[in-house]
Image (cartoon, rainbow, N blue to C red):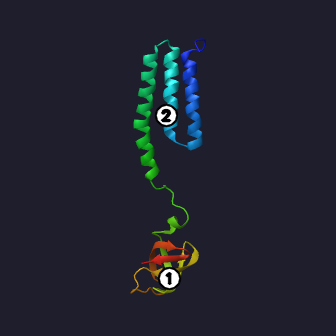
Amino acid sequence: MNDIDAWVWWLVGAAALGIPLVVTAMPEFGMLAVGAVAAAVVSSLGFDAVIQVLTFVVVSVALIAVVRPIAARHGRQRPQLATGIEALKGRQAVVLERVDASGGRIKLAGEIWSARALDTGRSYEVGQEVDVVDIEGATAIVI
């Protein structure tokens, strides 16, 4: 063990932390691995073990403290580009067959959809424009 420099052990530790990163997809292991690489750099510059460990701890904690909240904030955001039925919500459609609480037909995004009125007391007549508020299966809910 004395024949191998400390920086090599830090790199081995970084690689060992990379394995659970890949297996579990927990980014914290990657941040700890970066801390180990930083400690390896400090070790290769000739600093003693206390400075190496402090470098590992400071870099790892700093990455976790800074990167994790940013990643969590991005994980909660909705995608910028709505696709599928999410893209149809909020669009306008034209009534083709009378739409009420029991059903009807609309033309939405160039396609004919079955539709139902959100308000059970309302009905929409042929030619009237309606707004799509939700999609349930293959039925558009309109107001």
Point out residue 101 in the picture as x, y percentages from the top left corner. 45, 85
Q: Position of residue 57 (x, y in %)?
A: 43, 27
Name the element at disc 2: helix
- Looking at the picture, does residue 3 appear above or below residue 125? above
Mark linked to residue 31: 2
Q: Is residue 55 above or below residue 105?
A: above
Residue 11 in the figure: left or right of residue 90: right
The residue depicted at 52 percent of the width and 42 percent of the height is: 26
Categorize mark 1 by other alpha carbons within 10 Å: few (<14), some (14-19), many (20+).
Answer: many
Above or below 140: residue 120: below
Q: Secondary structure at mark 1?
A: strand
Q: Which mark is residue 109?
A: none
Q: Nearer the viewer, residue 19 or 62?
A: 19
The residue closer to the viewer here, 70 or 51, is 51
Q: Tally the marks.
A: 2
Name the quarter where the N terminus is drawn.
top right
Judge the density around disc 2: few (<14), some (14-19), many (≥20) Cα neighbours within 10 Å. many
Discs 2/1, front: 2
Q: Amino acid at mark 1?
A: Val
Of residues 120 and 62, which is closer to you in this image?
A: 62
Hey, what amino acid is under mark 2?
A: Met
Give me the residue at 53% from left, 15% from top: 44
N-term-proximal mark, 2 vs 1: 2
Q: Position of residue 96 (x, y in %)?
A: 53, 84
- Residue drawn 43% across the image and 36% down it: 64
User: Residue 127 location, x and y as percent?
Assistant: 49, 84
Residue furthest out toward the front: 1
For mark 1, what is the residue?
95
Instruction: Please identify the quarter of the rendering in which residue 118 is found.
Output: bottom left
Report the residue at 49% width, 22% height from top.
39
Quarter the C terminus occupies: bottom left
The Cα atoms of the two marked residues, 2 and 1, are separated by 55 Å
